Image (spheres, rainbow, N blue to C red):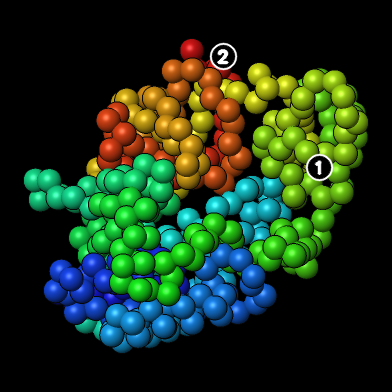
Amino acid sequence: MKVMLAMSGGVDSSVAGALLLEQGHDVVGVTMKLWGGDSDTGCCSVSDVDDARRVAQQLDIDHLVFNFGDDFNEHVVQPYVEAHARGVTPNPCIECNRHVKFSRMLHRADQLGFDAIATGHHARVEQHDGRHRLVRGADAAKDQSYVVHMLDQGALSRTLFPVGDIDKAEVRRLARQMGLRTASKPDSQDVCFITSTGGRETFLGHRIPFRRGEVVNEAGVHLGDVDAVELITIGQRRGLGLPGGGPKRYVTEVDVASGRVVVGDDADLHDAAITVRGVSWVDQPVNGSALVQCSAHGTPRLAIIVTKSDGNSEIQVDVTWHQPERRIAPGQSVVFYDPTDRYVLGGGLAAGWRHSSQTR
């Protein structure tokens, strides 16, 4: 099979290439050039491209560089900026997977006559009764099924995850055994267009005006002020300009339009239900009992999910947990797993919490 391998310059995609070759596939390595601005973190630096090219040489496969910068700006960077301006906290790496690293790459693979694409994600694809299932990676600590939850039947039928069946220690052992230059390279975990020196405040400050915000408690009593309400997110505790001492206070609501930040105690940060929008399914829509995970390495919690239309042809899911859960910020991904915690069912974006009293 002719396979286009996404090579990020990391150890996982490097070993993925070696495994594909062992399986007899015709492999071409591809590195995506996504961000043309300053980058000292993430997976888009010049050194990462160079590492990918050199590993391709070690594997004796062709290596191509695709410039998807316009797609990245349109579908990842601009929505990231616009989301913060609305008081929403996005996950740009998941949107990059959704729009660029899979959708755009699959389209390019079709154009060039490849049978499949492959990546170094720790996830698995299985077939059952003619359908494809997206499965958690074998290494629970490194499982990345959460960040590829948007893949549907069409995408899964043409996607390979060569390292999904082995743990990270084995990936590094294989890389050392083969003498790959990325064997000891640390994993990349940061947003590529946010530099470690400037941070999110500098990046957004060059692109949107910041608005001062008033910090109030649940009763509306003024407690202090923040310089940029656009930088505040649900669950935040530090950087609120509040005096020390006393009980811990967390952000429970952010309203950019009014410049209002509400803080409360830990109990105020919990609710039993949430609405999820922009939902996509691996296969068919699901109703009933499911495990729900709200961060890349968060603990999945049992809930009841109900799928319905919002009246505008957009599918949304109402999630009701058995016990109140800590709020997550609107814009963060909420991913559904089957009750055995093995298969991804689908996922979407947190849109709003519903108080416990409204769900009983």
Kindly report the distance in space between the C-alpha atoms of the residues bearing marks 2 and 1: 31 Å
Quarter the N terminus occupies: bottom left
Indicate which disc residue 293 carries. Answer: none
Q: Earlier in the sequence, mark 2 or mark 1?
A: 1
Q: Is residue 253 visible?
A: no
Name which residue type carries label 2: Ser
The spot of residue 53 in percent (x, y) is 42, 83
Residue 133: x %, y % from top left: 22, 47
Residue at coordinates 88% horizontally, 39% vertically from top-left? 241
Residue 270, position as x, y percentages in the image:
60, 23
Q: Residues within 10 Å of mark 2 (few under 14, many from 20)?
A: few
Q: Is residue 79 left or right of residue 159?
A: right
Residue 8 figure quarter: bottom left
Disc 2 vs disc 1: which is toward the camera? 1
**Vertical placement of 58 versus 186: above or below?**
below
Around disc 1, counting alpha carbons within 10 Å, would you say few (fewer than 14), some (14 to 19), or many (20 or more)? few
Q: What residue sits right under mark 1 in the picture?
A: 239
Q: Does the residue at mark 2 contact the one at mark 1 (Cβ under 8 Å)?
A: no
- Which residue bears the numbered disc 2? 357
The answer to whether residue 14 shows anywhere in this view is yes
Q: How many marks?
A: 2
Residue placed farthest to the left in the image? 129
Q: 63 or 86: which is nearer to us?
A: 63
Residue located 73% across and 30% down the image: 250
Q: Residue at x 90, y 31 (%)?
A: 243
Q: What's under tag 1, amino acid-wise? A: Gly
Q: Nearer the viewer, residue 247 or 139?
A: 139
> Is residue 18 shown above or below 291?
below
Residue 14 found in image quarter? bottom left
Q: Is residue 37 left or right of residue 33?
A: right
Q: Residue at x 28, y 84 (%)?
A: 61
